[in-house]
Image (cartoon, grey):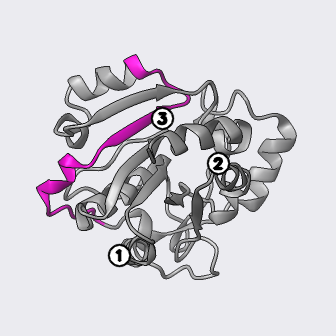
């Protein structure tokens, strides 16, 4: 099955290299996406541009597709389910949750000269980055791609309630399944509160398991394809 892989902020499709290799060995066709503004040299890309790239990949899939989103890109995966509920067979949310309709996509950090650069490691101290050594942190920061303002501040638009019928798997890296369930029950994640098929799986990692637990992450993603 085709499995679309959408990395979070500051990353391009190469973040999935090891995960993709494992998925291929498991008999799937991974499709790592490099989004407009995050790997193509453009700083003028918008959220709509990124959504269009994701939907083009869904439309190009052979049959139904699993869409996996990481961190902020969980919203992109959910937007794919909203726009193509009959084609997306499952959504895998890795270390994040979908943003609600009418809210900004990912305006988490300061915008500088039209982009949102990687803010350094201070905001991610603790469980997020505990499994990254100093070399890994330096490599990540050096390769980080500033997110265009038009992406970070773009407004999420969800229109088709059939998305709630698409199965969702929440992969819990730096938080536990119980924590995730608690946030949903408390009303912090209204989109998932309405999901009809919701599964939680744990992975013992920080916020970037594609770097620190790629084989295990691939197996969890592959399980959603069955």
Judging by the rendered image, the residue that carries numbered circle 1 is 48
Instruction: Name the image quarter holding residue 194.
Output: top left
- Give the SS element for disc 3: strand
Sequence-wise first label, 1 or 2: 2
Q: Residue at x 43, y 56 (%)?
A: 67
Q: Tell whether 130 sits left or right of 33.
A: right
Magenta region: 155-178
User: Magenta segment: does it hold 163?
Assistant: yes
Classify mark 3: residues with Cα within 10 Å, few (<14), some (14-19) or many (20+): many
* Residue at the (39%, 57%) spot, across then down: 77
89 or 112, which lies in front? 89
Disc number for residue 26: 2
Residue 195 falls in image quadrant: top left
The mark that comes first in sequence, 3 or 2, is: 2
What numbered label is drawn on residue 82? none
Where is residue 10 shown, x and y percent of the image?
A: 61, 59
First in residue order: circle 3 vs circle 1 = 1
Asked if the residue under mark 1 is in contact with the one under mark 3, i.e. CB atoms within 8 Å, the reply is no
Residue at image mark 3? 171
Q: Residues within 10 Å of mark 2 (few under 14, many from 20)?
A: few
Spatial separation of the CA atoms under disc 3 and disc 2: 19 Å
Can you say whether 180 is above or below 196 in the image? above
SS under mark 1: helix
Q: Residue at x 25, y 56 (%)?
A: 103
24 vs 178, left or right, is right
């Amino acid at each position: 099955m085709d499995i679309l892989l959408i990395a979070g902020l500051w990353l391009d499709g190469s973040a999935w290299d090891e995960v993709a290799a494992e998925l291929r060995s498991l008999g799937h066709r991974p499709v790592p996406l490099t989004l407009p503004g995050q790997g193509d040299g453009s700083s003028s890309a918008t959220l709509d541009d990124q959504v269009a790239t994701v939907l083009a990949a869904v439309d190009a899939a052979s049959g139904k597709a699993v869409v996996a989103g990481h961190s902020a890109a969980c919203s992109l995966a959910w937007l794919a389910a909203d726009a193509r509920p009959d084609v997306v067979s499952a959504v895998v949310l890795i270390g994040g949750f979908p943003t609600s309709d009418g809210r900004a996509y990912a305006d988490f950090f300061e915008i500088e000269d039209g982009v949102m650069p990687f803010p350094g490691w201070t905001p991610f101290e603790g469980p997020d980055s505990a499994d990254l050594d100093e070399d890994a942190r330096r490599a990540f920061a050096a390769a980080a791609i500033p997110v265009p303002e038009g992406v970070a501040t773009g407004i999420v638009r969800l229109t088709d309630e059939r998305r709630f019928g698409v199965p969702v798997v929440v992969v819990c890296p730096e938080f536990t399944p119980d924590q995730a369930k608690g946030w949903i029950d408390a009303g912090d994640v209204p989109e998932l509160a309405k999901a009809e098929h919701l599964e939680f799986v744990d992975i013992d990692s920080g916020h970037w398991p594609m770097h620190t637990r790629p084989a295990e992450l691939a197996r969890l993603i592959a399980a959603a394809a069955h």
